[in-house]
Amino acid sequence: MKKSKVQISERRRFISLMAQSVGITALGGLVWTGYVEEAKAAPLILRPPGAV
């Protein structure tokens, strides 16, 4: 007997789950990097006394 084509094999399910995990991790890394880059303080600029 052949298995139904509707049923997904364990191997395919595992690969799909791993691909989703890698994608979510990559997206989270991009969001985190964007946040860290945005949150950096402005560089300290030395100004003469009395300068505004």
Image: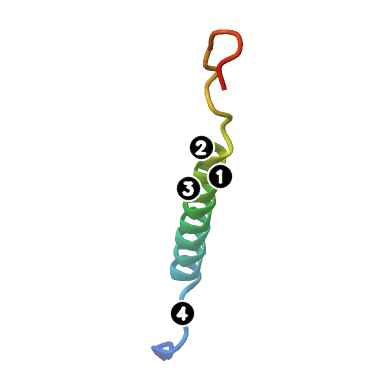
State the residue position of label 3.
Answer: 30
Counting residues from the start of the chain, the first of labels 4 and 2 encountered is 4
Name the residue: 46% across, 75% down.
Answer: 9
State the residue position of label 1.
Answer: 35
Q: Amino acid at mark 2?
A: Glu
Name the residue: 58% across, 29% down.
Answer: 41
Give the SS element for disc 1. helix
Q: Is residue 7 left or right of residue 44?
A: left
Q: Amino acid at mark 3?
A: Leu
Name the residue: 43% across, 87% down.
Answer: 3
Q: Position of residue 45 (x, y in %)?
A: 52, 16
State the quadrant of the N terminus: bottom left
Between 51 and 9, the one lying in front of the other is 51
State the quadrant of the C terminus: top right
Give the SS element for disc 2. helix
Which mark identifies residue 37?
Answer: 2
State the residue position of label 4.
Answer: 8
Give the SS element for disc 4. loop
Counting residues from the start of the chain, the first of labels 2 and 3 encountered is 3
Examine the rendered structure and indicate whether residue 17 appears above or below residue 8.
above
Q: Amino acid at mark 1?
A: Tyr
Q: Nearer the viewer, mark 4 or mark 2?
A: 2
Q: Position of residue 10 (x, y in %)?
A: 51, 70
Q: Nearer the viewer, mark 3 or mark 1?
A: 1
Cα distance in 3D space between marks 1 and 2: 5 Å
Counting residues from the start of the chain, the first of labels 4 and 1 encountered is 4
Looking at the image, which residue sits at the far top? 48
Cβ–Cβ under 8 Å for marks 4 and 2: no
Answer few, some or many: residues within 10 Å of disc 2's Cα (few below 14, many 20 plus, some between 14 and 19). Answer: few
Looking at the picture, the colour scheme in use is rainbow
